[in-house]
Structure formats: structure tokens, C-alpha cells
Amino acid sequence: MKTTKYIIAATLAVLGLNACEKLLDTENYTASNTANFPASFEEAEMMVTAIYSNMNHMSSRPSAGTFYFVSELASDDRFGGSGGQSFDKLLVTGETAFDFSWAQYYKGIYLANSAIEGLKLMENDVDDREKYEQLLGESYFMRAYNYYEMGTLFGRVPLLTSTTQDSNSPQVEPDVLFGQIASDLKQAIDLMSNKPWNAYVEFGHATKWAAEALMARAFLFYTGFFQKDSMPLAEGGSVTKQEVISWIDDCVNNSGHDLVGDYRNLWTYTNKYTVDDYPYTAGVKGVDGQPLLWAGNGNKEEVFSVKYMNYCGYYYPGQEGYSNFYIPFFGFAGTNGTGNTFPWGNGNGVGTVNSGLWEDWNREEPGDLRIRASILSIEEEVPDYDSGDISGQWEDCGYWAKKTLPVLAKAAYERQGSWVSSIFWAAYPEFDQANNYGITNWGGHFQDLILIRFADVLLMQSELKEDASGMNRVRARAGLQPVGYSLEALQRERRHELCFEGVRWNDIRRWHIAEQALSGQNNRAMNNAGADVVLRDGRYAERYKATEGFFPIPASQIRLSAGVLQQNAGWKEGDNYLYTVWNFD
Amino acid sequence: MQVKLTRFFLTLALGLAGISAWAQMGVKGTVSDSYGPMVGVSIIEKGTSNGTTTDLDGNFTITVSDNATLVISSIGYATQEVAAAPQLTIFMKEDSEFLEETVVVGYGVQKKKLVTGSTVQVKGDDLAAMNTVSALGALQSQTPGVNITVNNGQPGEGFKVNIRGLGTTGDSEPLYVIDGVAGGDINSLNPSDIETIDVLKDAASAAIYGARAANGVILVTTKQGKEGKMQVSYDMYYGWQNLYKRPATLTAQETMAMADEKAFQDGNPAINWEGRLGAKTWKRLQEGWKGTDWVEAILVPNAPTQNHALNIAGGTEISKFSGGFSYTDQNGILGKPVASHYNRYTARLNSDHVLLRSGDRDVIKVGENLTFYYSTKTGIGQLMRDYNDIRNAITASALLPMYDDEGNLYDRKDKEADGWVYASNEANPVLVMKSAHGNNLSRNYGITATAYTEIMPWSWLKYRGAFSYRMTAGSSRSLTVPYHAAGNTGSDAYKVDQSASLGHRISWENTLLFTMPKQGKHSFDALLGQSFEKTAVGERMSVSNSAPDGSQLPTMQGDMAHAWITNTANSLTATEIGGSPWPEWALLSFFGRANYNYADRYMATVILRADGSSNFARGHRWGFFPSVSAGWVVSEEAFMEKTRDWLSFLKVRFSWGQNGNQSISNFQYLSPVAFDPSHTYNFGNTILNTTATKPVGAYATNLANPDVTWETSEQFDLGVDTRFLRSRLSLTADYYVKYTRDWLVPAPVLATAGTGAPYVNGGDVRNEGVELSLGWNDHVNQDFHYGMNVNFSYNKNIVTRIANDEGILHGDAEVLDHGGSEFYRAQEGFPIGYFWGYKTAGVFQNQQEIDEWIAAGNGVAQTDPQPGDLKIVDYHKDGVIDDSDKTMIGNPHPDFRLGVSANFGWRGLDASVTLNGAFGHQIVYGYRSSTTDAFDHWTGEGTSNRFPRVGTGATGGKSVTDTVLENGDFLRIQNLSLGYDLKHLIKKLPFQQLRLYVSAQNLYTFTKYPGLDPEVGFGGNNLYGGGNSWVSGIDLGSYPLARTYLVGLNFKF
């Protein structure tokens, strides 16, 4: 009897407690959690979308150690200008210089790892096998893309390939890192659709063709920089040069990608609102016999690009990166861009062009239309340019990169009422700057940031096969005569065709000509905020020797890792890596 | 009987005859106390206005009816009633009323004398007398150990409150309990509605609120009904507010001089001002124009503030009620032409009714409390570096004209037309404020309704059950109109934001109070209780839309009256829509308290509370919070007999307890996956798309920590309460040590983790301090009384653990300047939020000093140091200046706080003064370079040994040094009032009181801090408007407190 009482009491107590717990259970009605997500194929697809968005977030702070920005300034073709001087000299202004990009890369990698894991969970519920494999391939591609940029920027980095891996993982050797890149790209090539570039997915998605091109790029860097014959695979074995050649041939032959009719049609100054008002392009017929006209975003020559849209703002961290924020950085500083320098616009004044490039190119290939298609000579084209005295322009040799300058249009001026915000995008009738920072000249840039261009694919094909046919196809489009293959010719061609597109820096490193090429920036005459100076010695060779072109691991991460992460050579205490003031006179 | 009857008839007869002289009697008497004769004692014939006072020798004479009763009173003494007699000797006993006073202790009241924890009570009347909009403003100087700092002076902005030091980097606000309902908003009450505020400072007192008490508890009791004559009072004031101190911003000429000097220092060519500013502006300058004074431009002189409060109370012993209505309106002193504004309406009705009575005991009683408020607020941009109109006005260049020739605000087109090319990003701050920041209106509504019943079947048992419902609702709108101030500052569109939200919360609590009948000298009572609180699913809707200029509807005009989404509906390309629930939350609690006391001499209290919070995963939900406390009234002891002459009361108390803090957002134990436009991507070739047509990405927002659980604070308190000299002098002293453990902090995980950090129980902090409260209240005679209170508190804050490898919780970067590094942090061994940067050792005066400095093995920050450069201390003497040389350069927490109040009354006249101050802390002076203080820099040997020359590189690129800090010590005359009760002059007035007064607020501040206001609660938001609540003392230019003069009126019927 007594026992029964106790049992009843105990049962009631347990029931009571359980009821209490139930009172305290809550549900989140607007977010899922990793325990129950993804629950459908559509949700897994959203995880893939998020990987791409990370490229926009990366664009939100170009000067915070991003690959494209750093590669451009560190290369021999550009100086730092106003605000990029540290990267140009292989220095940093402080120990936080790469905090942002480092973290952003790992966000991209985490998103890719989540998507790979999420898709694999869905594998058995999938009806559309082709789409499933395409999305999985894209996820592998994106992981490889992030690791490729990291691997060339930082050298030894921690390799995380799952969301549950200990985040405090040690750095891996380049063999291991590039092994993973090769393995991911090989899977991506195998998985993704064979259909032409624009036949299966919307532009912006990675394709099999982009994976083949990136494989070639990674292979050339790895085998060149580290002086190897083949690239290892994470699962064992290796990727041989012959395999890479077959992939790049596949890309050239089967992707559907092609060169656009005229080189100048790749760059936004030939857009329909500007082309007729810009003396350099007005009334000019292209190599293809057609009037010059910008081929637009997502044209057939773009193999892989970062896409932008009308969604730039402050609402979410990184949202500024929904416009191509690199462009305003590379615009003129000071008071230029208010119509006096039409069609070129205002910006931060970063990345002035090395006069050595202009001189070399005019000597090496005097008739090349790509010289003036790529480089703006202030003297020739914009005599009203003002070098400024207060917040003026630094390291100004009188040459600018047309590919990345903000481009103005008169139709935009009529809509905006002021030159400052009259970048040509504002001329489009559907242009709505409401979301773009509220500021046209910052938030209104939508041109794709081209990461891999088909001309690059052709040049890589030539380089891998040591055969001039790809190279000569590129030359023909520039109106130039064919040449025979030599490494020197190939190197020149890549420098010319791909200048200011973020590839030169890794090219000179993998060819082991970096010290010499960088030193070519010494003894250049330039203007610093109104003062004529000569950059006597930028100590380029010394810094390159010390660093091999790798940049520092963020010091805060090293501290947090409690000794697991090691700083790169040339960036340790006593290495004199801080840029403080311009003192190269 | 016979005699009485005879007298009755005699009285009747003589009364009828109108002769009464014989019934008068003369009374002579002496009044004394233990010290001897008393002067100024009041003697009144009961029920009449006939009275007198004692003379210097304590004697009095009065003529009264022969059966009269005399009422003998003197403040500070127990009032006596004696039958009239020709000769009287009266001995006055000191009033020990204060010992009978009760204080609110959470789920009940307790005699002040018996309280064993550390609490402080402030009376509502004292709060109301300060004439502040928020009760917190009035509390500021009256509660030692309660640190109340103004966030900023914009109307309707709140206060930062922490009790006994900052205990966490998370939510450090105390728990507010209003009429027994936890979690209310004290700013929704008019100070005139408040009967008392009781602050539970130590862990033992607060333990009854368990899981939310770690930061202390503030109990607010609103005015309750009173038995007797109906009382109606009306209080109002009207005031004029002005900027107390304006920054000495640079004139046009001074701006140019600074720029010229910098250009010269940098070896740049001299600035061609005419070419840079344009011929027109240059000409104006030549004609003597001093430039635009932007601060002057946004000043609102004599900004009005007013308050009206009506209170009614009355009732019988069966039914009582109290009601109040109020209206408050405050205009801002800065922000013309948009201006800040706040107003608030409140209504309150409290009543209780006895349904069943047995003898003296209310067997069944029911009651309700109902409060309602409605407030509106309009403000200008502030609190961030960029989105800050005050800062913009201070830092904008005086060279920029305010208006163009047509009288329109000077904008980008004017700059282009005039050829103004100097500093191209310079934007007209008034234009920015008027177009983008200042057009907003938010409204807030709230109702709290509580119904309760009390059942007392026996005198030893009382049950109380209360159910309460709280609704809060709000709506807001804002508008940006097209404007173009500068190249990177402008908008081409009308942008309208509109949002509304609604939340509900219920609580249900039941308590049983057992009061054991006294067993000899033993008293014992116990409380058992249960409560359940829950938020129902609230909702939030928001829409924002932009219509590019030209595409808006014709009804869209550039003002708030037309700022409705519908007016932008022609353009739906940039629409953001949000609709989300308010997170659900629930707290289930069981608690008990036992009080024991022996002869009112020895007492002890034990409290235990168990809380389960929905913020944690099953298995980590329940927390148990115990406390014990004890007190000893030493003055009751027989051996204290001989000190009783001067020592009226002495109590020693000790307490220990643990409290929790459950205040973190829910679901941290999971890794949430969000779907929102922040992770969208523009597939395809449509270039000008918004997120409306693009796929949304899904991503995990942060890593999970399934083990996340409470913060716990543990506190020891040792205190003394004393009264001296007939209780005129009082002294309360407390010493405490408070450890707060396991803060819920986002763990600074490695970036390799790839997503947001989880919350972990990661940090400990120790607060140790002393509080003293000294009071003197005396009455010289019936007409004159005076009093003074001094509160002093000292607190030391030290972080003892942060559970990551660095032992550091980093602050935001870029708070002070663009690209600037982190400069405050929480770190083991330092106060929370201390300022972290380079120490400086002066300025190199000449080359020899540079050489000596280097020869001594010190590093220099400058690549090529020259005289006038800053000497940055090479902490490690390793010849390199890098982050490892950064150290603590300042502390935002005051060491000491002081509150002083004094008052006196003489006949109908009253006067009071209140001061508050804080000492020993530093403030970041974030706009020195925009004021004439910028001229204090080095210009040659011996000119300055603190601020370097103005040239580039003088600081070696080290922007965060101790030169940005200033000592923040201040003492402020917070309130000075002078009033007169006309009733005293004109006795026939049909009021109980008709008091007229004048008052000055924020009259003067003694400080050496050069900025606008040394009270800087704010710590700086990051670029996205977020920020860390644990940092303070960063003055980027925030809304200063006004100096207010007011006149007021108190009526009492």
C-alpha cells in the first residue's frame, strides 16, 4: 500500500517535471538549425547559393587583403597610388591588414563544406541527378577556388574539409593543400554538366569548363612556383601535365566559350552610353569590322566571374560588396572625375600604372591596339587632370588602368545632375540607385569581376602544350601577326593580354622572374600629391626574397591558435615589414 | 452621574446664553527631552487651530477649553496627546518611527530595522522633486552603489545603469520589478506615479529573483490608495533648456591655418585657397566672413520642456484607489531644423477592495494595478562615428557655406558651381541631417494590468495570487529625401521605412506567507512561492521602400507627414519586407524565504530560488540560487545602555548569496541556419536586379554550444546601519565583494571556424567596493528644518578570467577613426572595457632628445623621427614599437562616485540642491582636432610636450595613444530648487498646499574635461550600428545634457 503511494507520488513528480520542461521548450519559427537542415533539395541548393555570396562579401572591403586587390598592387604593373602603397612594397600598414580576407576565405570554405555535407545528406532523395551532381561539383569548385587564392596569397594555411573538423588545425604543406585543390577540381570536372557554358546553368554558376581552367591555373602555379612535374591528389596519385592538357583542350573545344570580336569590347568604356562620346572609341570600327560595343556582363569570353547587383548597402555586414567595389578604389583621387577627365571617374586613387609597362610594351609590340585599350596616358587623353595638392594623388606616373577606372556617361549626367555620380550604369533606364549605398559613384558599379577569361584559357593551353596556336588566336583578335612559341613570347603575351586582371602577380612568381620584374619599378619618376619625386628604391627584391611573395598570417589568429599557427617568413618580429610613410625618395 | 448631568445642563444653559468665559482654562507647561528643555515644540488644542510653541526655556502658556486635549509635537519626536491641566510637565521621547518604516524586499515588505541585506529606498516624493523626465535621472545622486550614467542628452534616451560595478560583458542592466511584475520599463512611468523605489544591491536581497538578479534588482512601487479624505494633487513645471557648453569649433581662418601648417610640415606646396574654395567663397573670406558655425546653426535656443501630473487617491477601509495621469513633453536643444523631441502620456489606476473582513483581518481582498503609457520620439543621428549629426556639426569644415545664393542648403551642385574642390567629401551637415537622419518618428505604447487576490484565512497564513498581462507595441517611420551633399554623401531617392511591432507577456505567481505567532521573543515567518512568466508570440513587421526621384507618387512630399510606404509604391525595385515573430521565452520558478528574529535583536534570513529558463537546452535549464544573511542590532543589547544618549541605533549585517543571469538570446545551444538576402547571389545576366528576383542563400549563423548555461554572481556584503544623536545623524556603510562568473560571451573562435562564434560561459569579473551614506536631518524649531545627505561609493573592477587562449575579448575596430584599430577590450587583470593603446612620453623637443631616446634602446614609431614627433613608449624596450607595446592607457570606470543633496525649509519656503560627481576615470576626447584645442600642439621647442606637430607621420601612424584621453572627473550641480508654499501666507486658500517653485538643472559642472559633457555612458557603435554594451567613456560628440531653468507649481487639495 505504502509502496503504491510512493510509486504514484514519484510518477506524479516525474510527470510534473516533464510538464515543467515542456513549458520551457520553445521553437524558432524563422530559422532552422544545423540539426534539421537541409530538409529538402531546395534547401541544399540555397546552401550552394550562399557559397557564391561570399565572393560579394569579399568585395565589400577590397583593400582589406583581398586577392585581386593585393595581386594587382603587388605586381610590377601597378604602384600603390593613394592607399595601396604597402601592398605594392610587400609591406603592411599594421598587423590586421589580412584579418578580413583570411576570415572571409574561411567563411567561404565553411559554406562550401556545409553545402557538400548537406548535398550528400540529400543524395538519396534526389530525382534530378544531373542537377544534384552539378551543384555538388560547384561546391567542390568553390572550395578549390577559395583554397587556390589562399594558397597563393598565404602559402601554408590550415586545410579544413568538414564543418566538424577542429578549427584550430595546423597549417598544411603546399603539397597537401594543392593536393586537395586538385582533388576537388577533379571531382568538380567529373560531376558537372558537359553542356556548353550557357546551355545548362545561369551565368555565375561554376561550370565544368571553369573547373578545367582553374585546374590548369593551379597546376601551372604549383608546378612552376614549387618546381614540380605533377600535382598530387589528396586521395593519392597525382594529376599529370598530360591530364591537364586534355582538360584544357576539352575546355577550348567543347565549352562554347570564345573570344569576343574586339578586345576593347571587353571593357566598359565601350558601353553604349559612353562609346560615342569618348574620342578614343567614337566612330572606331573593331578588329571584327563592327562598331565598338561592350560585350556586356556574362559574355562568351567570361569563364568565371564575380557577379554584382543592385543590392549594395549597409544593412548586413558585407552588403557593400554587392557592387563591384574594386572599381571606385581604382578611380582617380582628388577633384578629378567631375567632367574634366571624361569619361573617367573619381575614386580612391589606388593602383596607378607603372610607366615601365607603357614603355616596355611600346618597345616590344609598338602597334598593339591593346596598349591604349588597356592603359590611359594622362598626357595623351586627359590634359585637364589635376594631380592635386591636399588629398592629392600619390605615386602617379601619368598612367592609369582603363580596365578598372570608373566610366562616366553623358546620359548618366543628365539623370544625376552631377558628374561625380554619373557612372555609366546610371544611364540605364532601369537603374535604381536606391539600394546602392544611396551613392552612385560608390555603389553603382555592376560590371563582373572576371576571374577567368577565355583568352587566359588559350594562353594556358599554349603554355602547357608549348605550342603557339592558342597564343596566336589571342594575338589575331588584337590584330597582331602570329609568332612562334617561346616561353619569353608567351610571358610577354600574358603580360599584355591579361594586364590588370589579377593574374600577373602569380605569373611572375611561378616563372621565378618576380625579383627582377618588381625591381623594374625602381627609379620611376612620379608625382606625390603635387610633388615630383623619383622612387629610388622600393626595396622590392629584398622583400620578395624575404617573403617569396606570401603575405602574413593574421597575428590575432596566431595568438588565438596558441602556437598552432606559424607566421610566414619575412613577417616575423624584426623583419621590418611595416609601412609607415613614403620614404623611397 | 449627577455631576455630569448638572454640568450638561449648565453648559447648555450658559451656551445658550452665549457666555462661555468660565469654561476656558489657562495651561502653563514645560517641555523637555533627555537633553533638557526643548525650544519650538508645537502645542495645539486638538480639533482647533489654537496653538503655540515653547520658548527658549521650553515653557509655554496657552488658554484652552477646560476639557481640551493638547497635541504636543516636534519633528523627530513621538507626538503626544495629553489632557489639558493648569500645570504640565512633558517629556518628549525621540521618535523611532524610522525603525517602524517598511521597505519592499521582493514578494513582500519588511521592517527596515530587520532587513539583513543591503538595500536602499528612495521616496517617490524625493524623485518627483527633481523634475526629471525619467525616474532614473532623479535616482542618480541618491543611491550609493547604483551607477546611473546618461547615455546621451537627446530627449527620450535612456540611462546606463549598473549596480555595484559592471559584472558582465553581456546584459548588465538590473532587473526592474514594477508593482511585483518583473521586466517592466521604468521610463514608462512618470516620477510622480512612484511611491517608492527600493534597490536590492547585495546578492542575498536580490536572491529571491534568482535567475535575473545577478545585476541587482530595482523594485518600483507605484502610488497606492489611501484611506481617508480624498487627495487630489496637480504638479506641473515648464522649463527652458539651452546648451550648457558649446565646443570651441574652428573658424574658417583657423581651419585654413591648421591646414597650411600641415602642408608646410609635410613639405607640400602651400595650399592655393582661392583655387580650392572657389572665387566666391574666397571673396567672402576676404570680406571678413568667419566661416559657418555649424553648432550654432543647429542650436535650438530655449527649447521648452514641460510636465503635468494629476494624482488622485482616496478610499475607505473597504475600498481604496489611486489614479494618476501625466503628460511630459521635452524638446531637444540641438538638431534645428529637424530637432529632437519626446513626449509621453501615462495613466495609472490602482485599487483594492476587501470582500470579507473578520475583525481587523482582511480575509479576502482583491485588487488591481493598471498602467498605460504612450510615448513618441523623434531624434537626429548620433552614437556612431559616421551617422552622427552632433559630430558632423562639430567636425564639419567652417569653410563650407551653409546656404547658396538662393537660400537653399549648400550642396554638391553648389560646390561644383562655385568651384569648391577643397576636401571633396566635405558635406553640409545640416543638409545631411535634414534630408537623411532627422526625419523619423517612433511611437511606443504599453499596458500592464495586474489582478491579484489575497486570502488570509487565519492570521498566520496569507495567500497571494497575481496574474499580470503586459502588452507593448511600437511603430516607427523614417524618411530620406533626395539630396546630394558631397560626392560620397547623398541619395537620389525617397526612402521610407515603416515598421510596427507588438508583444505580449504574461506572468502568474502564487505565494503563501506563514507568520508564526510570537513564541516569547522568537519571531518566524516563511514565504513559499511559485511563478511562471512567458512571452506569447509577438510580431514585428517592417517595410522599407525607395522611389528614385521622379518615380514617386505625386502625394510624396519631403516631410514626415507624407512619409508613408504607399507614397513610394510606384517603384518596387528596392523593397525590403520583414515580418518576424518576437522570440518566445519562458521562465518557471519556485522560491522560498524564511525570516527569523529574536527580540528584534538577532535576525537571519535564508532564501532559495530555483529557475528554469527557456534560453537553454534541456539539462542546462535549471539553476538554484541560495542566499543567507544575518543581522545583529547591537544597540538593543543591554551593554549598549550607556551609549544610547548618542547612539540611537546600530545594526551590523552580513550576507552571502548567489544570483543568476539568464539574459542571452535563445537557441545558442543550436547552430541556427538563416535564410536572408545577406547571402543572395546574382546568377544570370540581369544586372540591375535586387534581391526580389534572386535566390536567397542559407547559412549557419554561428556554431552551437549545447552546454551554454547561466552566469552566476556571488556576493559577500558586510554592512552597518547607524543612527546617532536622536536619530538626526545617520550613517550606512557597506563593504562588498562580487564575483560574476561564467559570463555568456561569444567565444573568440579562430577565423578558420568559418562562421560566428558560439556563446560560451567564458569570463569572470570581480567587483569590490565600499559604499557610505551619511545623512543629517534636524529641526531647529517648528519653522526651520534642514538636512543633508552625502553618498559615496568606491568600486574596483577587475576581470579575472576570459576562457580563451588570449584571455582577451576584443572591442570593435574603427570606432574612433576610419581604419583605426581596436582600442578597448576586456582582458584578464584589467577592468572591463579598459582603453588599450600606446603610452606616450611626451614630444621630442629637439634632435638631441631623439638621439638620447634611441641610444637608450627605445624604439621609435616614426620611420624618420624629427623634433615635434610623438615619443611612444617602447614598453618592452626591444627597439620596435608594435602592438605588444600597447597597454592600459585609461579606465572608463570611475573609482569614486559622489552624490550630495541638501535641503532646508523655513516656514513656507523650501530650498534644495543636489550634486553628483564621478572621479578617477578617463574619457576618449574624440573631436579635439576640430576645436581650438587642436592648437595646443607642438610648434617648436618647448611649446608642447603632449601633442605632436601636425604633420603626417608625427605619430608614426599610431592613432591610439594616451593623447586621445582626458581625465573625466566631474562634479555637477544637478538641481537647485527654491519653492514657496502660498498656503503659508494665505491661510484661507482652499488647498492643502499651493507651492510655487523655480529650479535650475545642470547649472554648473566642475570639470577639467574639455569636451561637451564629462558624463559619457556611450561606448561607440561600430559601422553597422551595433556595439558592445560593456564599453563606455568614448565621446565622439554625443548629445549633451541641457541646462534647464524651470518654474513649477504643486497643488494639493
Image (spheres, coloured by chain):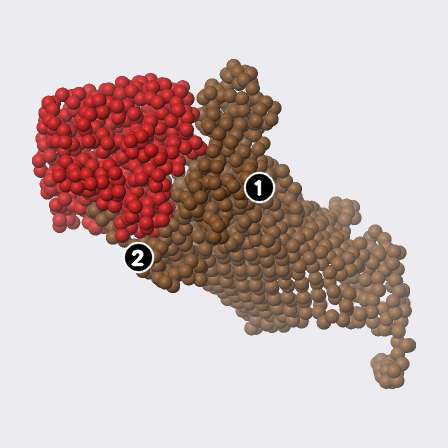
Chain colours: A red, B brown
Q: Nearer the viewer, residue B185 or A28?
A: B185
Residue wearing tag 1 = B288
Judge from the rendering whether residue B492 lies leftward or rightward of residue A180; answer left or right.
right
Q: Which part of the image, by quadrant, shows the N terminus of chain A?
A: bottom left
Residue A446 at x, y percent in the picture:
27, 44
At 59% from the left and 58% from the top, the residue drawn is: B305
Q: Nearer the viewer, residue A37 or B658?
A: A37
Real-space Cα distance between discs 1 and 2? 50 Å
Q: Amino acid at mark 2?
A: Leu
Q: Which part of the image, by quadrant, shows the C terminus of chain A?
A: top left
Judge from the rendering whether residue A260 lies leftward or rightward of residue B886; answer left or right.
left
At 71% from the left and 58% from the top, the residue drawn is: B979
At 29% from the left and 31% from the top, the residue drawn is: A380
Residue A467 lies in quadrant: top left
Q: Amino acid at mark 1?
A: Gly
At 89% from the left and 71% from the top, the residue drawn is: B25
Residue B840 at x, y percent in the picture:
54, 26
Residue wearing tag 2 = B572
Q: Nearer the viewer, residue B6 or A448?
A: A448
For label 1, the SS is loop
Judge from the rendering whether residue A568 lies leftward or rightward of residue B58; answer left or right.
left
| Chain under callout 2 | B
Q: Which mark is residue B205?
A: none
- Closer to the chain start, of discs 1 and 2, is 1
Residue B371 at x, y percent in the picture:
52, 64
Q: Nearer the viewer, residue A108 or B896?
A: A108
Q: Is residue B509 above or below residue B791?
A: below
Judge from the rendering whether residue A240 lies leftward or rightward of residue A144; answer left or right.
left
How crowded pointer 1 is (Cα within 10 Å; few <14, some 14-19, many 20+) is rated as: few
How crowded pointer 2 is (Cα within 10 Å; few <14, some 14-19, many 20+) is rated as: some
For label 2, the SS is loop
| Chain under callout 1 | B
